[in-house]
Amino acid sequence: MMQELRLALRNAGTINPRSIDDYITAGGYKALTKTHNTKQSDLIDMLERSGRLRGRGGAAFNTGLKWSSAYQAAGTEKYIICNADEGEPGTYKDRTILESDPHTVIEGLLIGAYAIGASNAYIYCRGEYREVIRLLEDAVSQTKQMGYCDNVTIQIAYGAGSYVCGEETALIESLEGNRGEPRLKPPFPTIAGFRGKPTVVNNVETFAVVPLIVEQGAEWFQSIGAPDYPGTKVFSLSGDINNKGCFEAPTNITLHDIVYGFGGGISEGHRLKAVQLGGSSCGFLTPDMLDLPVDVESLRSIGSALGSGAVLVIDDTHNIVDILVGIAEFFVHESCGKCVPCREGTLRVMQLLKQLAAGQASISVQDQLRDLSDYMSMSCFCPLGQSATTALCSALDLFKEDFSVKLHGQEVH
């Protein structure tokens, strides 16, 4: 079996997540102490030099640039938010990090608060993660008692489990007590975010590695993984795979390493049909793509995405159309309804796919689905609607025979 390289999960299974003493013994909060002896601009510059630490939530935006924008923004009232609203199907990396080592995320959050000059911090957690919320509340209380929070107030907030609140502006709307719907950008949150003030929003996994970068240095982090997306990535494996679970590895590993190395391959007697990497809003990859590195830029070069790091493995017992029906149902349920193209488009896509799956669709259904996809990608307000048919479009290109089976009752070879 392949070996992991754990950064975000470095303390998982080796410390008691409920004990701040265990975290301190493992070297915790040393980076925060070092931070307070470093100029804010130098700290942000180090993140830039670390090979552009890029967000691990899915968008892969440059963390140093985001912090720099908020640091330079006018005004003294600023906010920093940890996005723990993990709603992507098949993704459970943030929950795993928080359940095993909440203090590394809190330390990263406090370092970020110092860097941008924020005195208020929030951890916005998915409402279903009740145990994680209790764990975080205890960890924040311990951190305050030990004096590490200094002048920063950390509050734990949680939403009602809306997928769209994983998008930073919808999260901010929810945090303000409003309906969780995305805002028009610009202005971006680093200029006008929570309560109209400069705000940084980063993912759990992003904050978890910040203390290590501060402690070990930019060059050390840059030396790990892919040059344009350095460091490690936590992957969540599910589906028709022998070894399900979370693992962390350098960002230059291949899809083959994931499926047959860490995942242990699929059950004997079956063959690999497809991998959906990144979550329901991402496309499918086929077995001939197994040698592809899974860093952000390599995947973008073929029109794919790393997304949240969810890995859904599909074997030859499935028709891809049936998988698409489940994805379509998810997006219908999670559309916030703000814009007509998403609200009505996701519903119509689901209806057409259900007709197709039941063998009741007309021969023109594929053209109808493509037209709907094009319209939604161009006119939906936010990435939820724009990417709701990404999996569908890739399946139409890669698995024509599966659609033919549903239309004509042929066998898949």
Image (cartoon, grey):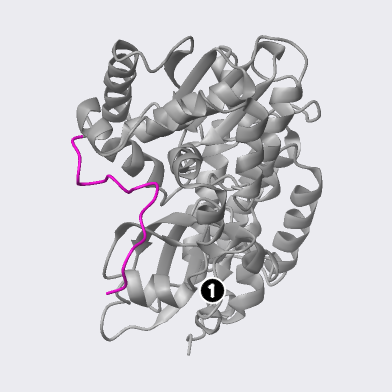
Magenta stretch bounds:
1-16
Horizontal relation, residue 114 to residue 187: left or right: left
Q: Which residue is mark 1?
A: 406
Q: Residue at x 43, y 14 (%)?
A: 155
Vertical position of residue 22 compared to residue 270: above or below: above
Vertical position of residue 135 compared to residue 238: above or below: above
Q: Position of residue 372 (x, y in %)?
A: 74, 54
Q: Position of residue 118 (x, y in %)?
A: 59, 16
360 or 293, which is in the foreground? 293
Q: Is residue 237 magenta?
A: no
Q: Quadrant of the N terminus?
A: bottom left
- Amino acid type at circle 1 is Lys
Q: Is residue 3 magenta?
A: yes
Q: Residue at x 59, y 63 (%)?
A: 283
Vertical position of residue 118 compared to residue 272: above or below: above
Horizontal relation, residue 10 to residue 67: left or right: left
**Residue occupying the far front of the picture:** 37
Q: Is residue 82 visible?
A: yes
- SS majority, magenta: loop
Few, some or many residues within 10 Å of mark 1 (<14, 14–19, 20+): many
**Residue occupying the far bottom of the picture:** 413
Q: Is residue 181 visible?
A: no
Q: Residue at x 46, y 55 (%)?
A: 233
187 or 318, which is in the foreground? 187
Q: Residue at x 63, y 26 (%)?
A: 40
Q: Position of residue 102 (x, y in %)?
A: 33, 32
Location of residue 81 (image quadrant): top right
Horizontal relation, residue 230 to residue 312: left or right: right
Asked which secondary structure carries label 1, the reply is helix
